[in-house]
Each structure stands twice: as C-alpha cells, then as structure tokens.
Image: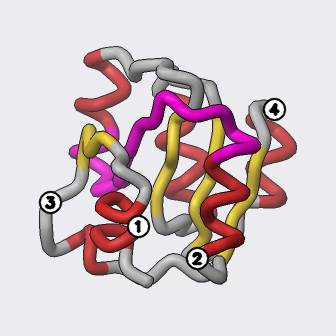
Amino acid sequence: MTVSELATRLDLKVYTGEQSTRERCVSGCYIGDLLSLAMSKVQMDSAWITIQTNMNIVAVSSLADGACIIIADGFVPDDSTLEKAKEQEVIILGSELSAYDIAKKLAELGI
C-alpha cells in the first residue's frame, strides 16, 4: 500500500510530502516516542507512529529511510519541523486517533 492510499484509508492529514513522494510503499510499522530507540527500530519503508512533533523526528525518519511519520493524538508539528521535513522529503501525516488505534487500523490493512 502506498502512503497516499494509507492517508486516504485512515483519513490522515497530510502535513508534508509531494504527491510523487506519497507513492512510496509502506511495508511495516513502528510505534514509539523515544527518539534514541526509534533510531534503531524504524525500518526502511515503515510508518512510524509517534506523538513527537519536534524537528528531530525528521532526522530519525530520514536516517532510517522510513516511508512516513504519523503523528497521533491530534498533536501538530511546528513550522520548523515542517520546513525541515520538506527539505529532507520526509512525509509527515497526522491523526486524532491514538497510536494504538492507528496501529490497529494498519494491522487491519495488512501492514
């Protein structure tokens, strides 16, 4: 499933990511808010679910080559995070749902 399809199916808000970058496939998921742990756990092409919104999430996702970041619980990234994500071509999505509910929906979709 592509990031675009995922965003549509889960009704996610798209904060960053050109249409072309949202065609990237999502093949897994990691949930966590501790950045140092996420650096070793987020895998290539996986969605990372977190409540973190600072610009360090962009660096972690970029290093791991993750498919996208999904910010849960209605948290909103600040402008500096969005600017850095655009520079690094990191896709940031958002949801009012909890991390658990997002992960449950991903599992139902086979991710």
Q: Which residue lies under the disc numbered 1?
A: 6
Name above or below for residue 19 compared with residue 17: below
Q: CA distance from mark 1 to mark 3?
A: 15 Å
Category of crowding for the residue at label 2, using alpha-carbon neighbours closer than 10 angstroms: few (below 14), some (14–19), many (at least 20): few
Whether pointer 3 and pointer 4 mark residues with C-beta atoms closer than 8 Å, the reply is: no
User: Sequence-wise, which precedes: disc 3 or disc 4?
Assistant: 3
Q: CA distance from mark 2 to mark 1?
A: 9 Å
User: Sequence-wise, which precedes: disc 3 or disc 2?
Assistant: 3
Taking the spot 32% from the left edge, 73% from the top edge, the residue there is 5
The quarter of the picture where residue 47 lies is: bottom right
Relative to 1, is 24 on the left or the right? left
Category of crowding for the residue at label 3, using alpha-carbon neighbours closer than 10 angstroms: few (below 14), some (14–19), many (at least 20): few
Q: Position of residue 31 (x, y in %)?
A: 76, 48
Taking the spot 46% from the left edge, 36% from the top edge, the residue there is 95
Front disc: 2 or 1 = 2
Whether pointer 2 and pointer 1 mark residues with C-beta atoms closer than 8 Å, the reply is: yes
Q: Which residue lies under the disc numbered 4?
A: 34
Q: CA distance from mark 4 to mark 2?
A: 26 Å
Taking the spot 14% from the left edge, 60% from the top edge, the residue there is 18
Q: Nearer the viewer, residue 65 or 31?
A: 31
Say what amino acid the circle numbered 3 marks.
Answer: Glu
Q: Identify the mark at residue 109; answer none if there is no mark.
A: 2
Q: Secondary structure at mark 3?
A: loop
User: Sequence-wise, which precedes: disc 4 or disc 1?
Assistant: 1
Q: Which residue lies under the disc numbered 3?
A: 18
**Residue numbers of the magenta segment:** 85-101
Front disc: 4 or 1 = 1
User: Sequence-wise, which precedes: disc 4 or disc 2?
Assistant: 4
Q: Nearer the viewer, residue 102 or 32?
A: 102
Relative to 32, is 74 on the left or the right? left
> Quadrant where the N terminus lies?
bottom left
